[in-house]
Image (cartoon, rainbow, N blue to C red):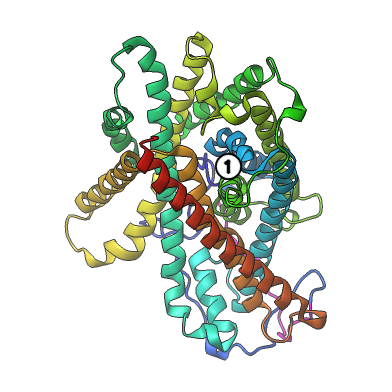
Amino acid sequence: MPSENLENVKLEPIGTTKNGSYRLDLPDLGKLDEHSVLLDEGTGDKGQDDEEYDPHLHRQVEKPTTNAETLIHLLKGCLGTGILAMPEAFKFSGMANGIISTILIGALCTYCLHVLVKAQYVLCKRLKVPLLTYPESMKVACELGPPCLKKFAPYAPDVTNFFLVFYQIGICCVYVVFVGKNLKAVVDIYTEPKELSLTVYIISVFLPFVLIICVRNLKLLAPFSVVANIITFITFGVVGYYVCQQLPAFSDLPAFGTLFNYPLYFGTTLFSLQAVGVVIALENNMKTPKTFRGAFGVLNVGMGIVTVIYVLMAMMGYWRYGEKIKDSITLNFPKEDILAQVIKIMYSIAIFISYGLQGYVPVQILWTNYIEKHLENKQLFWEYVLRVGCVLVTFVLAATVPLLGLFISLVGAFCLSALGIAFPAIIELCAYWPNNLGPGKWILIKDVILIIIGIVGLCAGSYSCIYSIVNELAKGNT
């Protein structure tokens, strides 16, 4: 899952202010002509600037990461709760369709990340700045792109921040539901026949979640995050132990699911595989960022490994439990097994720790861009009010819609179709506009196709998820 385990990744780029926000003194965009883009890798024509500006050489990273370290961070950032929901995603797609589609979506996610990183590099060369944040990239792209987009430039950062905040809040909601469901699965065994509702378990962990999001210095969470990472990989080992027992006949599983359920699969898979947030942070903090995008660079190797792991986990989980698979595969483990109970509690603790990291992002975006500048006094007090408010929002949503699998799918379809597919294509199209779109304007054609895929994924996936959520709530299946 994208953006998880960010304790070793700088969530804000270099050159931060005291509040952690990064701001660029952008040059006058009106003085940049249509030929000023400096392209790389042989795409289009070379720019006509006298001085070759390389943003990579102007980044001042205090402690840059090596290729190996970046690869480890990428793997940790992609492997999270989403992987435990992938077997259920295969129930929506069917086995054969799921295997093929996951590989294709993994390739699509990887390609879109390449597009985003490269387009941001081109924009940085054009503006002669070391780096741009995602919202800044959208604004600059709209300013320099087709005339029809220029009027949207002032709103582009806010739209991007909206999707980023919604995405991170959605992740936090998923975490709350995950912890509540796994805690209930364990405790209910010892309280039968008087089982408590899921809402009670969700409310019972409210205070710990408030405390962890109120940790303002992420370095304090680093030791706990190391423990969380160890627990995560132990959990994957335990999952492998359970799914490899008593496998049914492979031919009994349907090869294809229904067309209506496919968007549910798409949203879950996109949620699990797309790593747009962590990738930008990683590339910005590399010692050798030029190696990030090579044919055998960090991005391709990391995403290749992640895709294979997800395919294997989804395939084995769905093969083992079939149509009985639940929205987190841990809920399929034998309830009476001590090992299953221990791993549910341990992984819930790991997810609880990650909540503090994920909650940091929306707090920073909202506080830095929209709240702090309007306050003169009691800033610390109101920052804590914001932190508690974010936790309250996630708990209200989690208690209202405690459908883990559908929530994961909704967040993936709505947010990552935009952030991971459509927006990178828009940024690239604008970065090369108008005279560097390649032979036959193939970049324009390709990016328009990606934008359409992103819009269709957002609309179809969100509709299917909301429709299914409403039906499940009407049935009382929470």
Q: Nearest the camera: 121 or 141?
A: 141
Please report the residue visible at 54 percent of the width from the left and 86 percent of the height from the top. 148
The answer to whether residue 220 is visible is no
| Left or right: residue 225 compared with residue 432 | left
* Disc 1 target residue: 77
**Looking at the image, how many numbered discs can be counted on the residues?**
1
Split into 4 quadrants, where in the image is the C terminus?
top left
Q: Who's the residue at 72% across and 85% down the image?
A: 50
Quadrant of image for the N terminus: top right
From the image, give the main secondary structure of the stretch colored magenta: loop
Residue 478 included in the magenta stretch of the image: no
Q: Amino acid at mark 1?
A: Gly
Answer with left or right where residue 44 lies relative to residue 203: right
The location of residue 456, given as percent across then percent down, is 58, 64
Tag 1, which secondary structure?
A: helix
Residue that appears at 35% across and 43% down: 474
Identify whether 128 is placed above or below 423: below
**Quarter residue 461 falls in:** bottom right
Q: As rendered, which of 408 and 34 lies closer to the eye?
A: 408
Q: Is residue 398 above or below residue 353?
A: below
**Percent of width and height locating residue 443:** 74, 75
Whether 54 is among the magenta residues is yes
Is the residue 167 above or below the residue 26 in the image?
above
Badge 1 density bin: few <14, some 14–19, many ≥20, Cα 10 Å: many
Q: Nearer the viewer, residue 447 or 24?
A: 447
Q: Is residue 163 left or right of residue 400?
A: right
The segment highlighted magenta reads: 44-62
Quadrant of the rendered image containing residue 125: bottom right
Evaluate whether residue 276 shows in this view: yes
Q: Residue at x 29, y 35 (%)?
A: 211
Most extreme residue toward the left, as rendered? 377
Residue 440 placement (x, y as % from top left): 81, 82
